[in-house]
Image: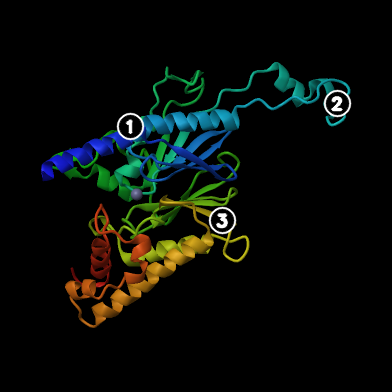
Amino acid sequence: MRRFGLIFLAVAAFAQQKTADIHVLPVQGNIYMLVGAGGNIAASVGPDGILLVDAGTSQMSAKVLSTVLQLVTAVAASPSPNRCTGLHCSDSPYRWSSPSLNALIASPAPPKPIRYIINTGIDPDHTGGNEALSALPADSKILGVTFPPVGVAPTATVIAHENVLGRMSAEINGKPAVASGLWPTDTYRGTSYKLSEFFNGEGVQLFHEPAAHTDGDSMVYFRYSDVIAAGDILSTTSYPVIDLAKGGTIQGALAGLNHILDLAIPEFRSQGGTLVIPGHGRLCDTGDVANYRNMVAIIKDRVEDMVKKGMTLQQVKAAKPTLEYDGLYGATTGPWTTDMFVEAVYKSLSPKH
Ligand SMILES: [Zn+2]
């Protein structure tokens, strides 16, 4: 019976996968949020091409690719309307050589492909699409447009913190932990990194959060669009996932959330202004991040007190330090249960574990 149930679940999951779609939410400026491919994906779309923050799962790569190519075709390559040409255009100093006329006689440039993928972490729901999305075959024709256009490198640069590459390439039984096609091609070390020049009209900055979800987390800050892609440091659907085995800690998760709040500026009374794309869940503003940060700080302080009193893990779990938040973020089943979260907090704060 149990076995039958499992098979049923597997079939249901497969059916869901087959029908799952990618949803696109325009965030602000050049930035779009793609939902439905595992972790959320942030896309910068414009005349320089496409930059993705995270790549989703490998199963969803084809759908992510067709979605971003539709997006770039719509956003960057649509011809501008010609409302006036010729000598009598009062709004143009160029007259017959006006940009409006040039647009009339020239076809629009083909959209440029994915140029960069930045990984916020190592998990397969964020890095699984790295290979498929970065190495588009040179002769592929999608939506009637040949990718990549002439003169553009056929592969995207995949950027992550060096700890991501270190863990992916670490050998287990003589084989790397993750297949080399999924590895980042460029890494950085230290506290931050930035693209050397504007991409789609703005600076793009990465910040390393050294011990939050793991020891290889990056946040990506789009400085002109004023959007932060936070990766798994922030989730609106669960407690922060603290992967102790990969160097995560509750203290680092709190520090990461505080860092987002340092960078973000609300438009008015903690609403609007800088927008933050979480690793999972819905789009956030400063107020949302502050509420989540407060929840993490309160639970950390409670467990810290219990650890200082010498309580065991079982006693801490029984005291339910997360109780009033369980309705929002708790889970009794699935990959990250409330029990696992409390245990990770306890172990982060215990002198030895
Ligand atoms: Zn994730």
Which residue position is annotated with label 3? 274
Badge 1: residue crowd in 10 Å (few <14, some 14–19, many ≥20):
few
Q: Mark 1 or mark 3: name the one nearer the start of the chain.
A: 1
Horizontally, is 216 left or right of 284 in the view? left
Which residue position is annotated with label 1? 18
Which residue position is annotated with label 2? 89
**Residue 126 appears at what percent x and percent y?**
35, 44
Amino acid on which the number 3 mark rests in the picture: Thr
Q: Secondary structure at mark 1?
A: helix
Mark nearest the camera among 1 and 3 is 1
Q: Mark 2 or mark 3: name the one nearer the start of the chain.
A: 2
Amino acid on which the number 1 mark rests in the picture: Lys
Residue displayed at 12% across by 45% down: 2
Badge 2: residue crowd in 10 Å (few <14, some 14–19, many ≥20):
some
Extreme residue in the front direction? 1
Q: Mark 2 or mark 1: name the one nearer the start of the chain.
A: 1
Q: Is residue 64 above or below residue 279?
A: above
**Residue 261 appears at what percent x and percent y?**
50, 63
- Tell me the number on the disc at residue 345: none
Residue displayed at 10% across by 43% down: 1
Amino acid on which the number 2 mark rests in the picture: Cys
Badge 3: residue crowd in 10 Å (few <14, some 14–19, many ≥20):
many
